[in-house]
């Protein structure tokens, strides 16, 4: 086994228990102000001992780009105006609440090795469906433009009252994966400190392995999606939803026997409730979702939900843009604009995903372009595919240049447009100037189209209407006689997606 550095923060002594634990709040030890101040100081010391340098005093946590209040770094913590309570709601809900039809814990990481090698990673723990749990574990070796897929099925044991997940693969030789609160020496959860170990062994090739062993600390308080952490999910139900948008991460990453000591930044989503989203066709809504880390200390969550007719709605419940500023203040809006600038064809299924976005948010002055770092970052799920992957960000905030990294998740895909020429009718007789018109029978709000009309006769083709944005244009047949083909071509903005429809007409005298 090769390693870039033999130093490791992972001793057997500090691994902690491998299954559930009883949650006990240090905050309940004493109610006096002096006791609580001592506890706050204890949290600061503990944070420095476990290897994270974000805490600098008894009353603040310092983000490199701003100063965040410290009062949220004690359990129990309940954000104002929200029903979500930490650490209780970091744990599982589906095990005791039959109304919860979907729950997941989603983590992404952008990390770098000691020698500067860059990786992006996604792991997700899903509540079981029919007693089986799907666990994606996808790893992108950015500098070599290689993607490793560690998605598999197994069993998830999920504790209640705090974060305590254990995933057991169907592959017998694979170690158990877990995601849980970091514990102090007394077995108490340290607020917003976490451990995750995820493993994958290819069932067809045992030399093909990947794993991570990460410690992480939330630098900023939880972001409450929608303002209070409870949102409608289009036509698919309702969900409790919070995110930890700025995790400081360090640990060990292994790929096919090569080990890297890494550190970087992460993001965690926890979502649960009476809703159902899936890349499968029966889902009421498909979506595009982007988590953005900017170099100015801001994070943004960008989401768009498509209804069953592929329409987008700029209204609550069908996506929004949320943000956490460098000073830890939060906001969200449905007043934003997304322009899809390019598409990528997934040849295996003959459909397309967005591969470039421009996102503008007037309230914050955000104006950035987001583009995937690697073209094919698809994930297979029961024969369907969705998209998960690293993207690069560049643009401005309030006119000031910014760069950053993003992770994109897309269950929505685009099909080639089906164009129907409605006039002139196939086989009809025309003369002089007339109006050509058409319609798209499978419109998609995420796929704006332009249309080009050509007249074809005897091998010669002439463009008579070029990149029209509407569904009609005037065509002059005065210089033609006999049979003429009228072709309408629909094109995406980058012309990656194109389709044509043609009718034959007879030009009379």
Image (cartoon, rainbow, N blue to C red):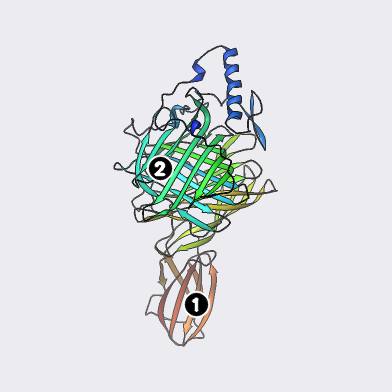
Taking depth in this image into account, of 509 and 292 the one nearest to the observer is 292
Tell me where residue 25 appears, x and y as whole percent: 48, 20
- Residue 305 lies, in percent from the top left, at 45, 48
Point 46% across, 82% down: residue: 431
Q: Is residue 476 above or below residue 386?
A: below
Quarter of the image where one finds residue 5: top right
Q: Which residue is mark 1?
A: 454
Residue placed under numbered mark 2 in the picture: 175
Residue at (49% x, 35% y) in the render: 195
Left or right of 219 on screen, residue 232? left
Residue placed furthest toward the top: 32
Residue 227 image offset from top left, x and y in percent = 52, 34
Q: Is 27 situated left or right of 365 in this image?
A: left
Precedes in sequence: disc 2 or disc 1: 2
Q: Is residue 334 visible?
A: no
In terms of secondary structure, where does tag 2 sit? loop
- In the rendered image, the vertical position of residue 22 relative to residue 128, given as above or below: above
Q: Quadrant of the C terminus?
A: bottom left
Front residue of 221/473: it is 221
Instruction: Say above or below: 502 vs 220.
Output: below
């Amino acid at each position: 086994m090769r390693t870039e550095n033999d130093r490791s923060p992972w001793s057997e002594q500090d691994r902690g228990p491998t299954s559930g634990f009883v949650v006990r709040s240090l905050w309940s030890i004493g109610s006096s102000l002096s006791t609580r101040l001592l506890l706050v100081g204890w949290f600061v010391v503990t944070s420095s001992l476990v290897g994270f340098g974000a805490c600098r005093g008894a009353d603040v946590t310092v983000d490199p780009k701003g100063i965040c209040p410290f009062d949220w770094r004690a359990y129990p913590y309940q954000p104002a105006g929200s029903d979500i309570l930490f650490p209780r709601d970091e744990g599982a809900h589906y095990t005791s609440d039959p109304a919860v039809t979907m729950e997941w814990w989603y983590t992404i990481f952008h990390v770098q090795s000691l020698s500067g090698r860059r990786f992006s990673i996604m792991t997700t723990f899903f509540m079981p469906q029919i007693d089986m749990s799907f666990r994606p574990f996808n790893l992108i070796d950015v500098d070599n433009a290689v993607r490793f897929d560690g998605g598999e099925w197994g069993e998830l044991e999920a504790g209640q009252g705090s974060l305590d997940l254990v995933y057991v693969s169907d592959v017998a030789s694979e170690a158990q994966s877990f995601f849980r609160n970091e514990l102090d020496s007394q077995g108490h959860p340290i607020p917003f400190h976490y451990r995750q170990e995820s493993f994958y062994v290819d069932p067809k090739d045992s030399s093909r392995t990947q794993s991570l062993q990460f410690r992480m600390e939330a630098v900023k308080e939880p972001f409450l999606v929608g303002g209070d952490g409870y949102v409608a999910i289009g036509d698919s139900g309702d969900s409790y939803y919070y995110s930890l948008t700025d995790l400081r991460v360090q640990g060990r990453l292994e790929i096919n026997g090569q080990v890297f000591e890494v550190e970087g930044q992460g993001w965690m989503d926890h979502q649960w409730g009476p809703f159902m989203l899936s890349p499968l066709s029966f889902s009421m809504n498909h979506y595009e979702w982007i988590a953005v880390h900017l170099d100015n200390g801001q994070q943004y969550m960008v989401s768009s939900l498509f209804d069953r007719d592929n329409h987008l709605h700029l209204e609550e419940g069908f996506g929004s843009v949320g943000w956490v500023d460098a000073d830890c203040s939060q906001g969200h809006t449905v007043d934003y604009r997304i322009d899809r600038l390019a598409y990528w064809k997934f040849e295996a299924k003959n459909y397309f995903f967005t591969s470039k976005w421009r996102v503008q948010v007037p309230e914050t002055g955000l104006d950035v372009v987001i583009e995937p770092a690697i073209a094919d970052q698809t994930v297979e799920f029961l024969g369907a595919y969705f998209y998960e992957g690293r993207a690069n960000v560049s643009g401005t905030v309030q006119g000031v240049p910014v760069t950053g990294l993003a992770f994109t998740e897309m269950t929505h895909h685009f099909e080639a447009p089906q164009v129907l020429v409605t006039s002139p009718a196939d086989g009809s007789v025309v003369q002089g100037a007339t109006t050509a018109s058409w319609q798209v029978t499978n419109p998609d709000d995420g796929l704006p189209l332009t249309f080009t009309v050509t007249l074809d006769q005897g091998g010669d083709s002439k463009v008579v209407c070029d990149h029209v944005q509407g569904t009609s244009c005037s065509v002059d047949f005065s210089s033609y006689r006999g049979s003429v083909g009228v072709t309408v071509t629909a094109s995406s903005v980058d012309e990656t997606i194109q389709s044509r429809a043609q009718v034959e007409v007879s030009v009379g005298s």
